[in-house]
Image (tube, rainbow, N blue to C red):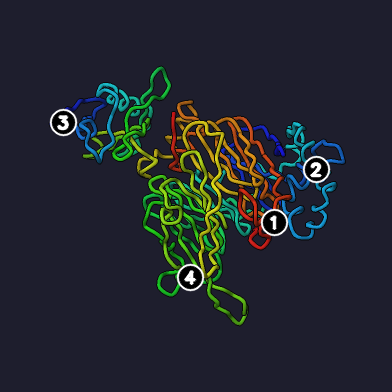
Amino acid sequence: MQPLRLTIPGEFYDSQIYAGRLHLWEVDHSIRTYNWDELIDSLAVPENLNLAVQCGFRRSDYLYGSQWDLIFQDKDIRSTITKKFSRLATHSLEMSSSHLTKALVDHQSNPINFPHSDSVIYGGRLYVAGQKGVWRTSCNKGNRHAISTRPNRIWDCPILSIAAAYGSLALSAGDEGLYEQNISDHDPWWAKDDDASDPKQLSATHSSSSHWTYYSVFSSSYKHSGYLADFDKESAQTADDPRFRKRVFRETISAEDIFHSKAYSWGVQDKLCQFLNGELKVIRYSPWYDGEQFEELPNLELSHEKGGFVSAESSTFGYIVEFDGGLSVVESDGSEFWIKGEPVSWRVFPKSKHYANHLHVIYDDRLVIYSFNSDYFVDQDEKIAGIKFNPRTRG
Amino acid sequence: MSRTLQTRGVTYIFKEDHRDGTAQKSQWTISEDDEFRSFEYAFDSNWIEENVGWGLYLVNTIPAFLGVAELPNRHRLLFIAKFVGSDRGKRWHGYPANPQDHQHDTPSNDVLLNWSERGFVSRAKMRKILKGQPCNL
């Protein structure tokens, strides 16, 4: 099934989508924030494609979940819904300047050092990382500006990549290694031994980017194959929360020990991947198992390899591998989709509640939002590619 | 004794270990004359910030490769020059920068933005440099 495509003209550098708002960093050091729901509702498409529009762009969670199992087993219903997505994919969806103007919430000066290396929104706060460190500011709808103009620098270490989950930031600091910074109101797991307000080094080994694999962190590197900072969860009940479980650091496991081969590796949630000789090696990671935590899955061959390897990510709809010449998307049903051209930047939202099917690709003159929707019809335990959809791990 | 040249009121030193195949050092693949011109152009373009400067090897205003990485990544082509000043900015030397392996080899935001605005480096390359990703011309 072809993905949906929505184009927003403009000269952008980064994008974030969160709680019904689309934030776009422009090259003139400004940020535009749009009311995303209003933008989607302004799309001129036939009424009978509205389900595809809403699920494709506003509610990726809607068609997931066991409540639809019985309905999706009906081939006629499944075929009807699939046809709606396929028909919408033939429409060239582009936001007009009048609709963009109407849905503009704010156009403000960028309050944080630009250009940055990475950004993330978590718990109503925007975190931006770059050469000068990590900034935090709020992006609540109640603020005067969409992005608060009073950011705080929470660390001054140069950071290459940032990821948020479990009340913490995972921070890739290149030669300085992998760190974790507590951003919750609770004491972090290292509070007993170290200052809770300071970032905690998980490893001194080089880290280029990092992602959360449930409550553990996988660190990727261009200097070696990467490693997993492996955590456990132990009961630590409190009077307020008798079911509270605390993360406990177990060990660092090298990607070479996991994959038994050397190459660029990355991991998100239940899937650890390695790009080796034009193929993806995939491991299913189950940190709560007493037995084997790492289960080898079948390799996936990439047919669209245009130029050298650049980077890779995972989402529910599949794996995304960037080459010099474009992006290769291996979808969860095993099909491969090639997006030609070197992007300025690109981003997926695997932990998002409503936008997990999005792939944002920024080019010199536009943002293209791809929406991949074949994953709704795939068995989440048996899927060929992509992380398992889990409603409990959505932000 | 390394060769030196005078320009813009400072001394530029040609470091031999970045030309003699030293394993731990990136190596220039352009001539010393071109290395020197790259430094002068960086100086004139205000790509010098206190004791660190950043340069490009421009061929008909288009950046070209100027060096290769240290071992074991000698195959990796490099296109950014890093210049380092000493003696209160009176003496300078340079080497091919390798931002994929060393964060301190990443040009500053201001220099990258200037390169992007002048069309020397695309925004896609700027992103790759900032994230320490593989970046080909």
Residue mark closest to the camera, 4 vs 3:
4
Would you say A302 lies left or right of A178 here? Answer: right
Q: Contact, CB < 8 Å: mark 2 with mark 4?
A: no
**Amino acid type, callout 1:** Gly
Residue A151 in sight in this render: no
Disc 2 residue type? Asp
Task: Name the outermost residue toward the top.
Answer: B60
For the question of whether residue B114 can be seen, the reply is: yes
- The CA distance from mark 3 to mark 2 is 68 Å
Instruction: Report crowding for label 4: few under 14, some 14 to 19, many 20 or more residues within 10 A (C-alpha).
Output: some
- In this view, the residue in front, A290 or B133, is A290
Percent from the top left, x then y, of residue A338? 61, 34
Distance from Cα at disc 3 to Cα at disc 1: 63 Å
The lab-note entry on whether marks 2 and 1 share a chain reads: yes
For mark 1, what is the residue?
A142
Q: Residue A222: where, in percent of width, then height?
A: 41, 45
| Residue corresponding to mark 4 | A248
* Mark 1 neighbour class, 10 Å CA radius: few under 14, some 14 to 19, many 20 or more: few
| Dots 3, 1 in contact, CB < 8 A | no
Between A384 and A288, the one nearer to me in the picture = A384
- Along the horizontal axis of the image, is A179 left or right of A384? left
Disc 2 target residue: A41
* Residue at the front extreme of this rendering: A298
Same chain for the residues under marks 3 and 1 in the image:
no
